[in-house]
């Protein structure tokens, strides 16, 4: 970029342009030098700018740089994004009873009397009836909330989601969040948004080339509708590495050259890259990406795992359902599987607040005994729409175990207090930790190096703070692991990449 400035100044000096035009063009060049990066995440989104010296995080939620990736649409299709979208959803579904009505799927006509062929005024008589499908329309729903749409972008089978009888493409549900981010950027960059580096995971859910291409195509289309038309996609772990290089640029104690492994473990994906670098000159080092690897595993999956293992047994899973049928008592295991997916996905938990589910819970409460309290909890969670609060408590307890050996999962709304230890948590994570080891092996193998060739390891992303993940990395790479800006490193690195014009063309 410094070379470009010198070239531009030389052209202006040797030209016959008036001084005012030269100054205007220099001002335009300065604007173009500001790099912009957008980290559109599964759980949260962040944006940043870089002027060649300083990284600035864009305020997206009030003065804060981190915005929940959420979109809410009401019945008039008015849109809210971020935390206001979540708050609106929670309030409008609190204590709301869901009553599903049937949709007309056909009209049947039955001939009840044939026409008298001998009477010219005679007409056949028919009876028409509407054919209704299974009740599945929530006529009283005030609004729809969409979270984690990024996880759907690579799925070719999901083209549209129905919102109040309107089929919405996934692109249309992503656009409001990106539009909100663009407005926030232009509020601090008065000249507007010229071009942007946009982060992407190594593997979208779907885990194949076609899924990745589809997801990127959908993101590019949504960004275009949001006014972000000059878009360059860039891998999230590579961006996080650039951010780290920027932070240590003046640190002469850091290695001047070698290999760096970056692990970006966020809300929806685990992404890795291996890069060789040379920091002998001032400024950003020269570097080469040796390999990338990733899997669709993140903090959201871990939260659901904790919910399933710690809370399901306290909400009635495994208990006996006793009721009277045809004059005799029938006992069977409570059909908790009917509730599981809706409980694990808090934006749709409110749909359990209808008679077909609550009647079964009420039966179990009436039968009394030790299990009655569990079903009372389940009923409270459903009727008062406490699912989001439950997941917030899970995230807080999970975060606490990064620093302490034991904490308490405390959810007073459903009368739950559980001692939660790091040992318990790590036992839950056994399978996931094996997956992390496998993807580490893959990244190292693709880079054609060994563990001993890695000079240092960067861990970033909220889930990288989990103690078991830290220990796994530190045991494998002793004295080489460092944490770097868990929630903002990717956006900062994208802004740096945009400023320098870096392009990524694969391994």
Image (cartoon, rainbow, N blue to C red):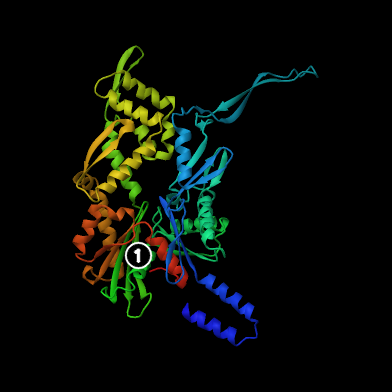
| Farthest top residue in view | 327
Would you name the residue on which mark 1 appears?
292
Query: Horizontal and vertical percent for residue 308?
Result: 30, 39
Query: Horizontal and vertical percent for residue 144?
Result: 50, 39
Q: Residue, x 36% and y 39% (percent of image)?
A: 344
Residue 319 falls in image quadrant: top left
Left or right relative to 494: residue 104: right
Residue 450 falls in image quadrant: bottom left
Using the image, determine if residue 213 lies above or below residue 80. below
| Farthest right residue in view | 120
Q: Residue, x 26% and y 47% (percent of image)?
A: 400
Residue 482 falls in image quadrant: bottom left
Using the image, determine if residue 266 lies above or below residue 345. below
Between residue 301 and residue 286, name the one nearer to us.
286
Check disc 1: other Cα within 10 Å, few if <14, some if 14-19, many if 20+: many
Q: Residue, x 28% and y 42% (percent of image)?
A: 306
Left or right relative to 210: residue 166: right
Query: Horizontal and vertical percent for residue 460?
Result: 32, 59
| Rendered-image quadrant of the C terminus | bottom left
Between residue 443 and residue 157, name the one nearer to us.
443
| Farthest bottom residue in view | 14
Using the image, determine if residue 144 lies above or below residue 44. above
Using the image, determine if residue 103 lies above or below residue 110. below
Query: Horizontal and vertical percent for residue 242?
Result: 37, 68
* Residue 341 visible in this rendered orientation of the protein: no
* Residue 122 visible in this rendered orientation of the protein: yes
Number of labels in the image equals 1
Between residue 98 and residue 340, name the one nearer to us.
98
- Secondary structure under badge 1? strand
């Amino acid at each position: 970029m410094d070379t470009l400035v010198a070239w531009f100044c030389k052209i202006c000096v040797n030209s016959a342009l008036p001084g005012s035009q030269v100054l205007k063009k220099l001002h335009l060049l300065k604007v173009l030098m500001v790099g912009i990066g957008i980290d559109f995440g599964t759980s949260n989104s962040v944006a940043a700018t870089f002027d060649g010296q300083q990284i600035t995080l864009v305020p997206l939620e009030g003065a804060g740089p981190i915005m929940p990736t959420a979109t809410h649409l009401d019945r008039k299709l008015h849109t809210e994004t971020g935390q206001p979208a979540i708050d609106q959803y929670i309030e409008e579904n609190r204590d709301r009873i869901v009553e599903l009505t049937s949709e007309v799927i056909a009209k049947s006509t039955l001939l009840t009397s044939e026409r008298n062929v001998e009477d010219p005024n005679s007409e056949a008589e028919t009876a028409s009836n509407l054919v209704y499908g299974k009740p599945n329309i929530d006529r009283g729903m005030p609004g729809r909330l969409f979270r984690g749409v990024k996880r759907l972008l690579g799925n070719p089978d999901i083209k549209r989601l129905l919102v109040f009888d309107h089929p919405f493409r996934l692109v249309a549900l992503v656009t409001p969040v990106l539009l909100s981010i663009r407005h926030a950027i232009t509020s601090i960059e008065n000249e507007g948004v010229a071009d942007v580096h946009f982060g992407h995971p190594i593997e979208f859910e779907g885990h194949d080339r076609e899924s990745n291409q589809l997801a990127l195509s959908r993101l590019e289309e949504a960004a275009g509708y949001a006014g972000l038309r000059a878009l360059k996609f860039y891998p999230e772990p590579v961006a996080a590495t650039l951010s780290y290089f920027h932070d240590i640029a003046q640190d002469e104690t850091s290695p001047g050259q070698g290999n760096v492994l970056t692990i970006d473990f966020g809300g929806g994906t685990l992404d890795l890259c291996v890069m060789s670098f040379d920091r002998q000159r001032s400024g950003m080092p020269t570097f080469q990406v040796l390999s990338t690897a990733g899997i669709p595993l993140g903090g959201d999956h871990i939260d659901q795992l904790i919910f399933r293992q710690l809370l399901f047994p306290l909400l009635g899973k495994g208990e006996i359902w006793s009721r009277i049928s045809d004059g005799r008592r029938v006992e069977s295991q409570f059909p908790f599987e009917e509730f599981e997916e809706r409980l694990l996905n808090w934006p749709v938990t409110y749909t359990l607040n209808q008679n077909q589910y609550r009647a079964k819970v009420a039966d179990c409460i009436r039968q009394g005994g030790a299990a009655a309290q569990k079903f009372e909890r389940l009923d409270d969670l459903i009727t008062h729409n406490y699912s989001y609060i439950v997941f917030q408590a899970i995230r807080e307890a999970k975060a606490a175990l990064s620093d302490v050996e034991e904490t308490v999962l405390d959810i007073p709304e459903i009368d739950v207090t559980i001692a939660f230890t790091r040992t318990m948590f790590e036992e839950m994570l056994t399978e996931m930790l094996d997956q992390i080891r496998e993807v580490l092996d893959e990244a190292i193998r693709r880079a054609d190096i060994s563990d001993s060739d890695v000079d240092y390891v960067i861990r970033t992303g909220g889930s990288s703070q989990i103690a078991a993940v830290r220990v796994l990395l530190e045991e494998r790479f002793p004295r080489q692991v460092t944490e770097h800006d868990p929630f903002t490193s990717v956006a900062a690195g994208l802004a740096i990449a945009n400023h320098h014009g870096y392009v990524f063309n694969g391994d």
